[in-house]
């Protein structure tokens, strides 16, 4: 899976995703930054009903509730993602792997290796 | 920067066949009547809606007096922005008697954000991350984790809202619901259930202000109005990323500015209206605005502190949860409620003990907050 491409401010280390051309804190020009892929769930909710369509395009086979959350990464950023974990098992602090792809970031559960 | 409230009025919120503008005209006429002021005595006017048209077109029904009428459109801070503009118009000498009006009308299930309008790639809409309720669920979910707030406390906030709404003739949701019923209603965005949320609706509120003194009869004063946009580090709706570390709060900034300008503190407030888009928002705004420490809400709600008979009554008219959320009107609805309470005319929901100092707070996307301190 490709790493997500973010941007980082060389001055104040702020990481933005999607990559912003200028740092929202100090206004400096940013540099490309590939996000790390391991993190922990900072917060979450469950989308219990189908979002309005358009703009939403659901997967085939009918609507299933899905978890949305923020994955906290070591470089000091929390990334919003669809969390591919069952609503019954999701918990703040759980270790996750973050990955890019065709759409928004997705995260999935991984073994806790500390 | 102070102003005397000559008149204050609102319409019945909810859903009807009326237009938002019709609500606005009714609210303005009622505020003028309350003030004992004729429309042609208004020297400047500020107002707006988010989705129900331009306020300056109201002159077609109110009268073509040539009044300078400025349209305001600032999301959930529309009413607060109209109010701060009105107070500044008085302070600057632009006019002596000034109107502020906010109104709106939204269909059921309103608020259709488009990714491009928020500077986001299309996939955020396509893949189902542009749903406002997700943000509210995620913010209070983390807050509960950090500060030990229970789901029952979230339900108690909504229970209070419906109880106060039942005592407010102009409220929309006037049927009391128990905490158990609120907890058992369908889950919308965990941990928030259907009855913990406000609904988009319609309504209007207006105030007539004047410069203090000048032989006018004393009344409720606006001691301070503040308006702030966010600084770095807040948690806002539709954010693909957040910085780590402690969250900052635009509500904290706006509340602090209002209290400093008024020369009072949260401990002096006898009645408060806090943005309650859903139950979690009221809980977090209690602390963000300085009324308690983070985490104290669990004990404060259990003790009934924010009830009408408690030490700090919050959302005495039922707030957004019981009145619905006509975006442009809510900020001035809060001001009308505080004025009504400070005048001692709140009927069944009157805060006992002759409240003297009141506070209002709105918060909304994309990170704006407006606060008011009033006293008599």
Image (spheres, rainbow, N blue to C red):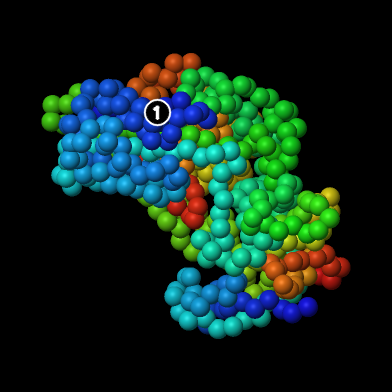
Q: Is residue B372 above or below residue B121?
A: above
The one nearer the camera, A112 or B51, is: B51
Q: Give the residue at the far top of this rendering.
A: B348
Q: Position of residue B318 (x, y in %)?
A: 53, 29
Residue at x-position 31% and y-position 41%: B57
Residue at 64 percent of width and 36 percent of height = B196
Q: Which residue lies at the image location 20% right of the left edge and 23% below the top edge?
A: B217
Badge 1: residue crowd in 10 Å (few <14, some 14–19, many ≥20): many
Task: Provide the residue designation for mark 1.
Answer: B10
- Report helix, strand or loop for mark 1: strand
Q: Is residue B250 left or right of residue A94?
A: left
Q: Quadrant of the N terminus of chain A?
A: bottom right
Please tell me which residue lies in front, B143 or B73.
B73
* Residue under the point 63% across and 48% down: B133
- Residue B5 is situated, as x and y percent measured from the top left of the image, at 28, 31
Which residue sits furthest right?
Answer: A111
Q: Is residue B197 left or right of residue A67?
A: left
The image quadrant of residue B32 is: top left
Taking B303 as reference, is A101 above or below it?
below
Front one among B267 and A69:
A69
Front-most of B261 and A10? Answer: A10
**Could you tell me residue B173's position as x and y percent?**
57, 26
Residue B280 location (% of width, % of height): 61, 42
């Amino acid at each position: 899976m490709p790493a997500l491409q973010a941007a980082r401010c060389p001055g104040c280390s702020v990481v933005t995703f999607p990559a912003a051309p200028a740092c929202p804190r100090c206004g400096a020009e940013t540099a490309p930054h590939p996000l790390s892929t391991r993190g922990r769930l900072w917060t979450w909710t469950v989308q219990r009903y189908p979002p309005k369509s358009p703009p939403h395009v659901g997967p085939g086979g009918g609507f299933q509730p899905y978890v949305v959350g923020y994955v906290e990464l070591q470089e000091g950023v929390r990334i919003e993602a669809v969390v591919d974990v069952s609503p019954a098992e999701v918990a703040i602090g759980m270790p996750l792997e973050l990955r890019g792809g065709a759409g928004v970031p997705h995260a999935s559960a991984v073994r806790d290796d500390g | 920067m102070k102003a005397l409230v000559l008149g204050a009025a609102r319409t019945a919120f909810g859903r009807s066949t009326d237009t938002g503008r019709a609500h606005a005209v009714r609210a303005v006429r009622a505020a003028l009547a309350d003030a004992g002021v004729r429309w042609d005595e208004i020297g400047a006017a500020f107002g707006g809606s988010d989705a129900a048209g331009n306020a300056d077109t109201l002159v077609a029904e109110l009268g073509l007096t040539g009044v300078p009428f400025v349209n305001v459109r600032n999301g959930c801070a529309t009413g607060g922005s109209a109010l701060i503009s009105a107070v500044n118009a008085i302070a600057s000498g632009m006019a002596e008697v000034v109107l502020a009006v906010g109104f709106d009308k939204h269909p059921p299930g309103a608020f259709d954000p488009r990714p491009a309008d928020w500077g986001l790639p299309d996939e955020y809409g396509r893949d189902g991350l542009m749903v406002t309720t997700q943000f509210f669920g995620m913010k209070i979910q983390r807050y509960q984790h950090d500060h030990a707030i229970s789901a029952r406390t979230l339900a108690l906030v909504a229970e209070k809202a419906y109880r106060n709404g039942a005592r407010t003739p102009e409220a929309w949701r006037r049927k009391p619901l128990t905490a158990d019923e609120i907890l058992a209603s369908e889950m919308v965005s965990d941990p928030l259930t259907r009855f913990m949320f406000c609904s988009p609706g319609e309504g209007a509120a207006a105030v007539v202000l004047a410069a203090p003194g000048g032989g006018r009869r004393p009344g409720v004063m606006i001691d301070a109005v503040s308006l702030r946009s966010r600084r770095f580090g807040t948690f806002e709706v539709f954010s693909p990323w957040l910085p780590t570390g402690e969250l900052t709060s635009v509500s904290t900034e706006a509340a602090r500015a209002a209290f400093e300008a008024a020369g009072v503190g949260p401990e002096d407030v006898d009645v408060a209206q806090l943005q309650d888009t859903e139950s979690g928002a009221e809980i977090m705004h209690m602390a963000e605005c300085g009324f308690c420490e983070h985490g104290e809400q669990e004990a404060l709600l259990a003790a009934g502190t924010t009830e009408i008979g408690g030490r700090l009554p919050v959302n005495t008219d039922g707030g957004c949860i019981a009145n619905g959320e006509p975006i442009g009107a809510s900020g001035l609805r809060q001001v009308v409620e505080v004025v009504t309470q400070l005048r001692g005319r709140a009927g069944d929901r009157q805060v006992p003990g002759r409240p003297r100092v009141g506070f209002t707070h709105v918060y909304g996307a994309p990170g704006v907050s407006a606060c008011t301190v009033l006293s008599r």
